[in-house]
Image (spheres, rainbow, N blue to C red):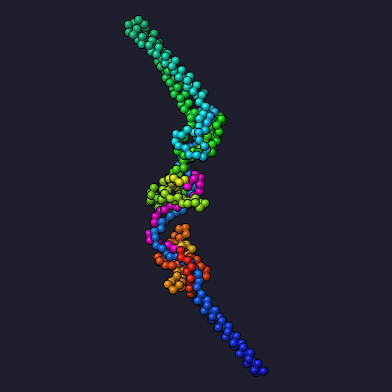
Amino acid sequence: MITMIRMKSIVITAAIAATVLGCAEKKQKQADERVPVTVATAEQKDIPLQVRAIGSVQPIATVAVRALVAGQLQRVWFREGEDVRKGQLLFTIDQRPYQATLSQAKANLARDEAQLRNAQSEAKRYAELVKKDYVTREEYEKFSSGAEAAGAVAAADRAAVENAQLQLAYCEIRSPMDGRTGSLQVQAGNLVKANDTTPLVTINQITPVYVTFALPESQLGALRARGLGNVPVTAAPRDGGNQVDGGKLTFVDNAVDPQTGTIALKATFANETRALWPGQFVNVAMTLANRANATVVPLQAVQNGQKGQYVYVVNDGNGIEMRPVTVVLQLENQAVIGKGVNPGDTVVTDGQIRLTPKSKVDVKKSL
């Protein structure tokens, strides 16, 4: 009986020793295990201090082309949606009624000018006769007044000719500016009205273009300090297209909107590649200043904890150090660090979830 009890004790003791030994080996194995991480190097560079907003693209100028005379639209000289140049012929309205009116006005002018010459000749002749008392002054004044009246009639005829020429010229509708045509509203063969509410076509100037946006009034002081034309602006389509550089702030509204507390702004872009299109919404970034020699790390390196933001810094022995940091600015996928990280430090950008202060790391990829 005693022998059996001793044997059981020996077995239990051996099991306990094996368990303890196994746990120790497991802890040792965990301590030796390296955590795979991705890292990046903290950089020092100049960072633009930007304000961002959502804006919309507007044409510099928009012209709704309307007919100034009524008639049948004979021909359209362009394809809708194509570019046109200033002075380019766009539409032709039937000229025959206006040509006939011009011919009639010229005929009336020729008739009345002949009558004017005859009246002037009579008035001149009676002026000589009245000096010799061959006719009375009343008779002379009658012919003199007749000559003046004939002159007024001829002047009215000349004005009628000019008006008829102008109406005839309106039959050819030309582009008032360089731009791009929109949808054609009236096809050839239709009757058009003078100054109709529906334009024949709308032309937008898209090179250059405006980008309009609004910023909080708190930015007004910085804007005024920089001055118009000295504030660079970029714009990028909201669908993820390429960023368009080269914009300049060219307009600051003269009042802050009291309902929104914002001020309206406009930037001008040359838009030579036509990446910006009227009516399009864009992401606008306006650079107000530059932060020199800033320490920058990838944004994904910054973690949030109970005591604030921190990063994991890799030391020479592949150990890590958890450092609290102060992020003073975020720019897209970068974070500007005020304190906590120095230029040249290696920070972990991926794999932080498995790290502890005593972990060793295995760098799989450097950014």
Instruction: Give the vertical position of 123 relative to 317 (above or below).
Output: above
Is residue 302 on the magenta stretch?
no
**Number of numbered discs overlaid on the protein picture:** 0
- Which residue: 48% across, 29% down? 170
77 vs 143, nearest the viewer: 77
Q: Residue furthest bottom?
A: 2
Decide if residue 183 is on the left or right side of residue 133: right
Q: Does the stretch in magenta take in 277?
A: yes
Q: Position of residue 317 (x, y in %)?
A: 44, 73
On screen, residue 169 above or below 340 = above
Please state which of residues 100 and 308 is positioned toward the viewer in this rendering: 100
Which region of the structure is painted magenta? 275-297
Query: Residue at the spot x=50%, y=26% of the render?
Result: 95
Helix, strand or loop for the magenta stretch, by majority: strand
Residue 69: x %, y % from top left: 51, 28
State whether residue 45 appears in this view. yes
Q: Residue furthest top?
A: 134
Q: Relative to residue 291, is residue 281 drawn left or right?
A: right
Q: Does 111 sit above or below residue 221?
A: above
User: Which image quarter: residue 177?
Assistant: top left
Position in image of residue 238 (x %, y %): 51, 51
Residue at image position (50%, 76%) is 32
The location of residue 308, given as percent across then percent down, is 48, 66
Question: Residue at the location (46% across, 27% down)?
Answer: 169
* Quarter of the figure with the N terminus: bottom right
Question: Can I make out residue 70 in this image?
Answer: no
Q: Residue furthest left?
A: 132
Q: Nearer the viewer, residue 342 or 137?
A: 342
